[in-house]
Amino acid sequence: MDFINQLNLGSGVEIALIAAICYAVTQAVKQTNIGNHWLPWISMAVGVVAGEVAGMSQGDSHYLSLGILGLLIGGATVGLFDGFKAPAVALKNKDAANIPQQVMPINNTEKDDLQNIISNTQNSHYDQVTAQKGGDSHGRIRS
């Protein structure tokens, strides 16, 4: 709400009145069967009307700025601006997650060692299976 106050569209009393009216109406609408996806629109429309009413009650004649103030406060009341913050945070987290990890290169001797370990493991498993079936080292089953 600080950025709304810095725009200097209305006084602090007008901002408080508009925010209270928007909050009360939004909470009342939540109790009805109206879908939550309509809440930002309802709150912003109420904010525009509340901005005009609050301005008239304070003797302010800047109706356009009061309408804009009500629109912004209505959006802020339902958390509309928090919705804009979420994608920015998601992009920031995505960029942090995409930092490439440094991979150490494998030289040829390490590669050969790994291949030997894999082939020995596969061969020993094959030997165990043929021994259980009663076969020799070439896979032939003895009769």
Image (tube, rainbow, N blue to C red):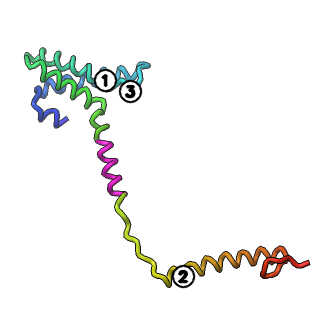
Label disc, if present, on residue 41 of the rendered structure: 1
Q: Tell us which disc is closer to us: 3 or 2.
A: 2
What residue is shown with label 3? Answer: 37
Q: Secondary structure at mark 3?
A: helix
103 shown above or below 23: below
Residues shaded magenta: 85-97
Give coordinates of residue 6: x percent, y percent.
Answer: 12, 35
Do tag 3 and tag 2 residues touch (Cβ < 8 Å)?
Answer: no
Label 2 vs 1, first from the N-terminus: 1
- State which quadrant residue 31 falls in: top left
What residue is shown with label 2? Answer: 112
Label 3 vs 2, first from the N-terminus: 3
Q: Amino acid at mark 2?
A: Asp
Which of these two is toward me, 107 or 80?
107
User: In screen coordinates, is 110 left or right of 123?
Assistant: left
* Residue drawn where x is 71% and y is 75% of the image: 125
Give coordinates of residue 15: x percent, y percent.
Answer: 17, 27
Which of these two is toward me, 37 or 13?
37
